[in-house]
Image (tube, rainbow, N blue to C red):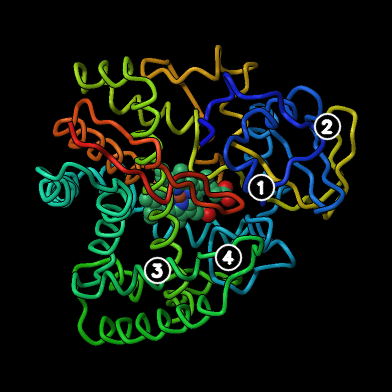
């Protein structure tokens, strides 16, 4: 399979960037480079979208939520109309977004998340210790997909016995068949099952409050447009739970597997981390810069925008490709080099501005602990040539399988 570096890849085909292309999924970085250099305001007529790739352009757009609206959704295949009634704050604009975000953000501050460190380590160690002694295992199925689901489930209050079923349903909602970006029939069935499950638990929390996020969501109040405090509706609570359960799973799963893959490709970098585990937090940031799990954030313009001499008209669908911005040499020297010692003052791997990843602290701590505990057990693992499977989605990038030969 093609390696994921822009460094030694074949020259890009500059005719089209297609976020649904399996071929480009293998290594989108050459086409991103061409877009940054030759088409900083890229236009795809066939799929009807624009795209920005340069670091500064995307940073400016992330910081201006009034011009770059999230209300049409953030993933190209779903940007077919306003998503105002979904209750998902990721699709809301200010001021509604600000109100919704405020009521949940306290649970995700670095301080609240720091208190979970011991619990997160216990979960990670449980999965990894169970693999010790096996000559080969799948880092995704056996570890990176399990850790974030367990962590967010325990925060929300989903009991252990239900987690596999909840995860199966959440994954099915996200599943896409080759060549078809839309959800499959089974996805709607899974969604109905998940809704029914959550409704039952929300009722239970209203009757018997517990010390978990689900209970907190039944108790918080959010001011409506005229300032009157309102409890969240069941629809809103379900939307919150689904967003929290889905936003953090795929992404951490992919980030950890990408880090393991990149560290295997760069054994000198891996050795550096084994010898200096205090650099692991920086390796997490470098991975988010180099090959982030969430490659672009979709927006719709609320006015005409002129950039680099081109006009993006009001109402246009625009992909802010943060995956491309991490490789922008205008911001990062030698950007195609994966360097765990790189000094990074800012990257766009978690987006930026009002919608900057709510779970960033949680993602950072899970990823740090995941890498620490993994390298402690397997400091010089190998990945067999047929052991890499890439998943395909328009904006999530990473592996669905990564075989590890233990050593
Ligand atoms: C490495 C892991 C992760 C990555 C790369 C990531 C990436 C992102 C990005 C790029 C955004 C911005 C979306 C936009 O601007 O439209 C975002 C938002 C969000 N993320 Fe994450 N995320 C990660 C982990 C998590 C985790 C663990 C949670 C757990 C709760 C989470 C919850 C959210 C939520 C709720 C939002 C929406 C925030 C808002 O609209 O204000 N994420 N994430």
Q: Label 1: how many residues lie within 10 Å, few (<14), some (14-19) or many (20+)?
A: many
Query: Of 347 and 11, which appears nearest the observer?
Result: 11
> Which residue is denoted by mark 2 in the rendering?
307
Q: Which residue of the protein is positioned furthest toward the top in this rendering? A: 333
Circle 2 sits in a helix, a strand or a loop, which is it?
strand
Circle 1 sits in a helix, a strand or a loop, which is it?
loop
Calculate the distance from the C-alpha at mark 2 to the C-alpha at mark 4.
36 Å
> Which residue is denoted by mark 3 in the rendering?
241
Query: Of 334 and 201, which appears nearest the observer?
Result: 334
What residue is rendered at 43% in x and 75% in y? Answer: 238
Calculate the distance from the C-alpha at mark 3 to the C-alpha at mark 1.
24 Å
For discs 3 and 4, the disc positioned in front in the rendered view: 4
What residue is rendered at 36% in x and 15% in y? Answer: 341
Q: Are marks 3 and 4 in contact (CB under 8 Å)?
A: no
First reached walking from the N terminus: tag 3 or tag 4: 4
Residue 358 seen from this side = no
Q: Label 3: how many residues lie within 10 Å, few (<14), some (14-19) or many (20+)?
A: some
Q: Position of residue 361 (x, y in %)?
A: 34, 42
Calculate the distance from the C-alpha at mark 3 to the C-alpha at mark 2.
38 Å
The reply, left or right, for residue 234 in relation to residue 263 is: right
Calculate the distance from the C-alpha at mark 3 to the C-alpha at mark 4.
25 Å
Would the CB of label 4 be found within 8 Å of ligand 1? no
279, above or below 193, in the image = above
For discs 3 and 1, the disc positioned in front in the rendered view: 3
> Which residue is denoted by mark 4 in the rendering?
177
> Which residue is denoted by mark 1 in the rendering?
65
Calculate the distance from the C-alpha at mark 1 to the C-alpha at mark 2.
17 Å
């Amino acid at each position: 399979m093609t390696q994921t570096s822009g460094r030694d890849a074949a020259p890009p085909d500059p005719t089209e960037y297609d976020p649904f292309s399996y071929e480009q999924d293998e290594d989108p970085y050459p086409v991103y480079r061409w877009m940054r250099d030759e088409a900083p305001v890229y236009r795809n007529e066939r799929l009807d979208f624009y795209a920005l790739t340069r670091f500064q352009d995307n940073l400016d757009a992330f910081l201006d939520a009034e011009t770059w609206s999230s209300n049409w959704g953030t993933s190209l295949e779903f940007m077919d109309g306003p998503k105002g009634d979904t209750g998902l704050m990721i699709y809301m604009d200010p001021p509604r977004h600000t109100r919704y975000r405020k009521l949940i953000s306290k649970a995700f501050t670095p301080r609240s998340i720091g208190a979970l460190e011991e619990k997160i380590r216990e979960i990670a160690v449980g999965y990894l210790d169970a693999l010790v002694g096996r000559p080969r295992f799948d880092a995704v199925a056996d570890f990176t997909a399990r850790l974030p689901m367990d962590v967010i489930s325990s925060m929300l209050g989903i009991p252990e016995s239900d987690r596999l079923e909840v995860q199966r349903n959440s994954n099915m909602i996200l599943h896409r068949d080759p060549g078809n970006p839309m959800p499959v029939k089974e996805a709607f069935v899974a969604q109905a099952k998940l809704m029914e499950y959550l409704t039952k638990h929300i009722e239970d929390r209203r009757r018997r409050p517990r010390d978990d996020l689900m209970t907190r969501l039944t108790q918080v109040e959010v001011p409506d447009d005229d300032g009157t405090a309102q409890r969240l509706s069941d629809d809103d609570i379900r939307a919150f739970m689904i967003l929290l359960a889905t936003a953090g799973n795929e992404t951490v799963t992919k980030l950890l597997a990408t880090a393991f893959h990149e560290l295997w490709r760069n054994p000198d970098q891996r050795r550096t981390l084994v010898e200096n585990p205090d650099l692991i937090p920086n390796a997490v940031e470098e991975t988010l810069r180099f090959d982030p799990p969430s490659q672009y954030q979709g927006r719709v313009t609320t006015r005409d925008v002129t950039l680099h001499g081109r006009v993006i008209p009001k109402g246009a669908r625009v992909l802010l490709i943060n995956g491309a911005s991490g490789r922008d040499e205008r911001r990062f020297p030698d950007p195609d080099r994966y360097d765990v010692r790189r000094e990074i003052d800012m990257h766009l791997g978690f987006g930026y501005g009002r919608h900057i990843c709510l779970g960033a602290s949680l993602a950072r701590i899970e990823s740090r602990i995941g890498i620490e505990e993994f390298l402690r057990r397997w400091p010089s693992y190998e990945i067999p040539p047929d052991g890499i499977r890439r998943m395909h989605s328009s904006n999530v990038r990473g592996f669905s399988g990564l075989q590890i030969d233990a050593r």
